[in-house]
């Protein structure tokens, strides 16, 4: 009897344990209970959070109509910023491909901002290229005989932007290099293109902001005006971005200041000076040797003291003493050579080799001259103030 009862109970347990419907029902009830628990915690179904997709484009600020004189440059990004509601660093691009800075007219510049979700905003502004303004009293023609002194000044805020950076100046330099050079050029060809651009696109004036080479380059690029400091600074920016080694030089012992560059194209450092020279003493100072620089210093002594005299001991590189290829230098002999007695005694000695000859290795560079004046050394009607 007891065996029969135990067998029936065991069979019943087996039937209950093997019923799939019961197991499925239990799972469904558990899922429903969990769902009600989630809804209870988060609110009704319509209040459940969705995966939010960013569809809001970024905003561009500060893009306004601009004006620039023919042949000058401008920083398209200066004063322009971008904000976005989700992306902290949206990308700003500037399309100025329709602009011709050498032809007066009205052109369109397009600013486009893109966020990380691919949303874009575009703003178009007008850029007016104008003819240069009439020359002011301080502007100098290379052919003029009388020039004001070269005195440093500080530009007003309308010329020099607040917070000017190396990146700003290099942006301008890159724009120019994209127009005047190409990857197939040799270093010499690039350097020559830079020399020609700076020499022809900056109009000489008697003063400049010499607070930093960045200021000098920015003003030279954006106004197309300046003195020797702007020619030097613009050359420095372009040479640097073209990956051409260069060194800064400054005149010592003269009655006026002068600044220029040394450049190495793989064969040693040569003098590189894109600034115009005094009337009657022309010189293409592209890759000239130390001997040629000293020869010119002697020839121009009557109108400019210590033209290419610099601190030899402090110069971080050695300048090539020999001669550059004859095709790279003009005849610098003026119509009337200044009398020998007018040349200051502190110039490099007369026995230094003239242009076209090579120094012997035993000939050391001269010591820097003392700052002395020879009475009547500079004639105010023969280019005084030209650096």
Image (cartoon, grey):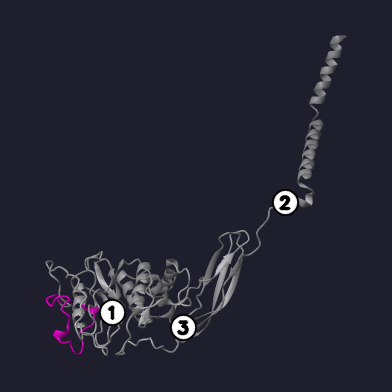
Separation of marks 3 and 2 at Cα, in angstroms: 56 Å
| Residue 111 belongs to the span the image colors magenta | no
Which residue is the site of mark 3? 69
> Where on the picture, by quarter, is residue 119?
bottom right
Q: Residue 126 location, x and y as percent? A: 55, 79
Q: Residue 311 location, x and y as percent? A: 23, 69
* Left or right placement of residue 365 versus residue 201 in this view: left
In the rendered image, is residue 193 in sight?
no
Which residues, given as a range, are shown in magenta?
A: 326-353
In the rendered image, is residue 231 in sight?
yes
From the image, state whether disc 3 or disc 2 is nearer to you: 3
Which residue is the site of mark 2? 49
Q: Tell me the crowding category of disc 3: few under 14, some 14 to 19, or many 20 or more residues within 10 angstroms, Cα based.
A: many
Of marks 3 and 2, which one's residue comes earlier in the chain?
2
Separation of marks 3 and 1 at Cα, in angstroms: 30 Å
Q: Tell me the crowding category of disc 2: few under 14, some 14 to 19, or many 20 or more residues within 10 angstroms, Cα based.
A: few
Which residue is the site of mark 1? 256
Of marks 3 and 1, which one's residue comes earlier in the chain?
3
Q: Nearer the viewer, residue 236 or 21?
A: 236
């Amino acid at each position: 009897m007891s065996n029969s009862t135990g067998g029936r109970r065991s069979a019943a347990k087996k039937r209950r344990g093997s019923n799939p419907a019961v197991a499925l029902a239990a799972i469904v009830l558990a899922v429903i209970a969990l769902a009600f628990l989630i809804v209870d915690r988060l609110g009704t179904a319509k209040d459940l959070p969705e995966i939010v997709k960013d569809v809001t484009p970024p905003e561009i600020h500060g893009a306004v109509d601009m004006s620039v004189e023919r042949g000058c440059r401008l920083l398209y990004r200066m004063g322009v910023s971008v904000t976005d509601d989700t992306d902290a660093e949206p990308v700003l691009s500037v399309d100025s491909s329709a602009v011709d800075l050498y032809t007066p007219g009205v052109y369109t510049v397009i600013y486009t901002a893109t966020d990380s979700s691919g949303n874009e905003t575009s703003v178009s502004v007008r850029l007016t290229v104008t003819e240069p303004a009439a020359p002011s009293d301080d502007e100098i023609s290379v052919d003029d005989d009388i020039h004001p002194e070269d005195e440093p000044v500080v530009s007003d805020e309308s010329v020099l932007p607040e917070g000017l950076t190396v990146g700003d100046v290099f942006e301008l330099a890159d724009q120019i290099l994209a127009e005047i050079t190409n990857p197939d050029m040799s270093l010499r060809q690039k350097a020559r293109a830079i020399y020609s651009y700076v020499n022809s696109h900056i109009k000489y004036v008697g003063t400049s902001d010499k607070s930093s080479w960045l200021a000098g380059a920015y003003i030279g690029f954006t106004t197309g005006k300046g003195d020797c400091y702007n020619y030097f600074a613009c050359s420095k920016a372009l040479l640097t971005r073209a990956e051409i080694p260069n060194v800064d030089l400054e005149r010592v012992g003269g009655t006026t200041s002068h600044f220029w560059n040394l450049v190495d194209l793989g064969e040693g450092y040569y003098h590189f000076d894109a600034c115009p020279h005094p009337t009657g003493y022309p010189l293409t100072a592209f890759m000239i040797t130390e001997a040629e620089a000293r020869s010119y210093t002697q020839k121009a002594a009557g109108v400019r003291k210590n033209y290419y005299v610099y601190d030899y001991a402090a110069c971080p590189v050695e300048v090539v003493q020999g001669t550059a290829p004859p095709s790279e230098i003009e005849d610098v002999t003026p119509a009337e050579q200044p009398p020998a007695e007018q040349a200051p005694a502190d110039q490099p000695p007369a026995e230094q080799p003239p242009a076209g000859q090579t120094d012997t290795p035993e000939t050391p560079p001269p010591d820097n001259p003392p700052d002395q004046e020879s009475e009547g050394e500079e004639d105010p009607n023969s280019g005084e103030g030209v650096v």
